[in-house]
Image (cartoon, coloured by chain):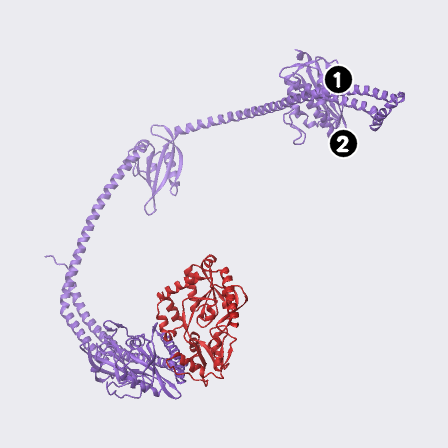
Amino acid sequence: MKKQLFFISFVLAIFSIAIPSAMASGDLADIKEKGVLRHLGVPYANFITGSGDGLSVEVMQLFSKRIGVKYEYVKTSWGTVINDLVGKKIKSIGEDVKILGETPIRGDVINNGLTILPWRQKVVDYSIPTFPSQVWLITRADSILKPIKPSGDINRDIKSVKAMLSGKTVLGKVGTCLDPALYHLEEVGAKTASFGGNLNDLAPAIISNAADAAILDVPDALVALEKWSGQILVLGPVSKPQMMGVGFRKSSPNLRKEFNRFLSEIWKNGTYIKLVKKYYPAVFDYYPEFFQRELN
Amino acid sequence: MYKLPFYTSANQIVKKRGKWQRISFFVAAILLVVFVGSLLGSNYFTLLHQKKMVLDRINTNLNGRVEAVSYFLDERQNDAAKVATGKIVGAYFSNKALGMSMAYGLKGSLNNVVNQFKHLTKTTLLKGKPIYKRVVLFDIDGNVLAETKSCTQCQFKKNNWKKIEQVSHMASGIVFDDNNPEHIMVVATVGKLGETVGFVVGWVNLNDIYEQFLCLQKHSSGYANLAMNFIALEVDEKIISPYPDIIDISSLHKRRIFNGSSGHVYRNSDSDEFSHKIHIPTGGFFVFEGDIAGKKEEFLVLRLMFPNRDISLIQFVKLSSIIDLKSPKNLLILMLIISFGVLAVVYFTIQRNIKNHVLIARLDEAAIKQQEIIKANESLRKEVEQRKETEKTLTDKRALLQSLFDSIPDLIFYKNIDSIYLGCNKTFEDFTGKTEKNIIGLSDYELFDSETAELFSEYGSKMFAITCRNEEWVVYPDGAKVLLDMLKTPYYSPDGEILGFIGIGRDITDRKKMEVELRNAKEGLSISNESLEKKVQERTQELQEAYSQLSMQEKMASIGQLSAGIAHEINTPAQFVGDNLRFIHKTFADMINIIKQVEKLQNISSQKEYQPIIKEILDTLNVIDIEYLIEETPLATEQALDGVKRISKIVKAMRVFSAGNEEKTSLDINEAIRSTLVVCKNEWKYNAKIVMELDENLPHVFCYSGEFNQVILNLIVNATYAVKERYPSGLGQITISTKKDKNSAEIRIEDNGIGIPEKIRNRIFDPFFTTKKVGKGTGQGLHIAYSIIVEKHNGSITFESEEGVGTTFIVRIPIKDSET
């Protein structure tokens, strides 16, 4: 009975998103007509530095030029970035979503290291994966927690990491890919907390002893290791490798299709790899296969 | 053979000259020796000083380079040490020590190290080029952890690992790689908890050091300036030659200590020991011999140690390139020998050639004198020719002058300052009756009679200082007496001295006669001109008067025509206005009767239905004040009729006044006077009262009526003016009377005005004479009146006047003549 009710509410939620979204349209033709592409973004790692540049910013600027419209950056937050795209107030419950109400549409596309998560896929369409990721557990250098020794088996490594979290406080951020609930950390006895600040401030929070550990995705962890060199430790993974992508409204299939075509092109001509090297030079050491793959 | 006398003197001169030449030579030789000696001495001390300076410069130069390279190497060691002890390299080793794995985070740490190395390479530049060709982080076992890969030549071989390990006891050092002679390695130790855990190694190209600090520019053929000097670096007791293919430094062998004449040896440090392997002592100049490009050369060598390093810098200077360093003493001796040798050679050469010089001098002198004689002869010949030419020219000019004199009809003669004749022309010969030959040499007293001679002599003495001109009567031998215009002027020598005077006499007897006649004719002509001018003035005045009269007449005729036209135009409406007024006057009388009958009707009408109408009529009559209208309207129409009559009278007067024509007509003078009074009433009515005493029996006269009217008008206007002048604010009186006086009609116009002053009474009929103010009168009125009455009508116009009493003008026109 409970499952039936949940299914009905889910179907209604999807309809409530799809129908107004379809009405709102905002697909490629509309964007070309308006002459502007609104890029929704949250300053995060080196995707959007907050200083007017970043990997995502440069990619979307190239895409705007490609489709012949003006580029416009619309700053948002992790709590509202999906809402601002689909025009609904969305609440994630585990891997499900709940519609809480209406909100204005503020942008046409999300690109700021948006991890592809099951709940997000229910309200947003993703492009071809643009960046690899994984969620690591980090702590400060003088912590009693010690890094695991890689076993070669990701599942075993995850288990080893979670095993040391019993009774430890772990910082994450609800509504993002760093939501502790996504990785079932409480199930292993960890005391999870949602960080109130910006994701870029998670590493300094750990250094200043705000919690025993925190979860960070790989791009952000690499930036933190560079920025706070010698002050943070990576203990090990809490997730399997993930992918990031660019998010589109479900009513913008042509825009998404055009972006995928564009991404394939800059992937092949080396532009995209060049931009990744500029902002994440170390990522090639961790995920060489991802960037060596061919896109069609 | 002719022998020139100066040959003997030339021989003596040469002998004397030879003696003096010898003395001069010895003096010059002594002076030369002293001069050369002083030069050599000065040169000797200068060379000593220069030698010292050269050695100082080489020493200072090498010292500066040692300091520069030493500082450069210190900075590189600091670079490496800073990286090795830095947070990023330290973080890697810390993270590794804490157990972080490559799979989860440690790769990121190494990547940060690589980024730091790249940054170091990019920012540490020498002349815009990166100093570090390669930077590597080794672990303690020599494994490469992180590196930049910009240099393929900077590979490291394991056999040198011990050298790097030797640095572990200090923070950083410089290591020379035997396998890579073009580079040195800058090594810094990475420590963790007091133990060495790795090394940061940077490769620096020696060529950059050579080029930047040792001023060596590498070319295809090696390093520039190699032929002169070069510098080598010595590390670990081995010389690192930047040009091993050109010179084998190890082949150099010591010849001697370079000890200058002053005995000074340069020392840079306390040590002067020889290097074990290369046998080059430090701190002094030495001379070494070696091969360079297959040729034996001597080099001046200086070797200086780097402070706190087992590295030294060696300067090689090719000795042959430093001329300044040759022994000054030897040079002095050589220069003295050469000087004396030159002096001796010069002396013997001069002695040997002195006789030849004497002979050559004589020959040269003879040749010069011969040339001078030839030139003098040539000059003399030209002078003779020139004189002949001048004489001929003078003769010709004299003949020309005489011909010119003779052809002139005037008397021409010339005398010297003593008044003795020197010459004359043909005319003068004729005048004197003697030939020129006979005249020359005579004085005036010998030539003329005493009277003429005195005259000539007097003029001659007067004119010596100046040019003078006189007219003189002289008598020709034939008795003819003529008047001569004599011009006498002095003539001068080229230096301005008066030599005499020239006289020119021209016969002006006929011309004088003509001048007298001409003067008489001019006087007669002048008298005629004065008479003519007077007549012209008179005619001009007459013409002006006639023109003025004509102008006035035309003006009056125009006024007359205008008046006639106006009168005609006014007369017609005046007639029908008068007719209508008379009609209204008569009709209104009838209307009054009707109104009176209506008033009676009210009293007699018994029918009530007419009463309101009658009442309404009577009310209307009351409203318009019919009683007043009945009383005043006839008076108004009568006054209007009177006005119309006056208009008609004025119009009629104007017509009469303006009815002049070009022919005489029969004129009623009284009527003409009345009309004129009407026309000019505006002139007199505010100033005078008119009294008319007209003879009604006065017969008509034949006259030009318009012009007669104008006379009367002018007289009335004048009388009005006189009255007004006397009575400016009152009324005077003008009395106009007419009567027949014998055969004339007499008109008298009398006023009681100011009268005519006695002094102007004879001028009042003159044209343009007026006593009125400017703009008020033209002065033509009485003149025209006189002209009309007297000249056109054969009448008369006279006046009687008394100042302050009045004036009476009397006009008389013949009746009989008029009638005819």
Question: Which class describes the residues within 10 Å of circle 2: few (<14), some (14-19), or many (20+)?
Answer: few
The quarter of the rendered structure image containing the C terminus of chain B is top right
Chain bearing mark 1 = B
Q: Is residue B221 above or below residue B667?
A: below
The quarter of the rendered structure image containing the N terminus of chain B is bottom left
Pinpoint residue B649: horizontal percent, then vertical percent: 73, 20
Chain coloured purple in the rendered structure = B
Label 1 sits on residue? B694
For chain A, the rendered hue is red
Looking at marks 1 and 2 on the same chain, the residue that comes earlier in the sequence is marked by 1
Tell me the quarter of the picture where residue B705 sits.
Answer: top right
Q: Identify which residue, A147 or B805, lies in the foreground.
A: A147
Furthest-front residue in this view: A1
Pinpoint residue A190: horizontal percent, then vertical percent: 49, 81
Q: Identify which residue, B230 or A168, lies in the foreground.
A: A168
Chain bearing mark 2 = B
Pinpoint residue B390: horizontal percent, then vertical percent: 24, 44
The numbered dot on residue B729 is 2
Pinpoint residue B548: horizontal percent, then vertical percent: 60, 25
Tell me the quarter of the picture where residue B94 sits.
Answer: bottom left
**B17 to the left or right of B522:** left
On the question of residue B209 being in view, the answer is yes
Which kind of residue does numbered mark 2 sit on? Ser
Q: Is residue B86 above or below residue A120?
A: below
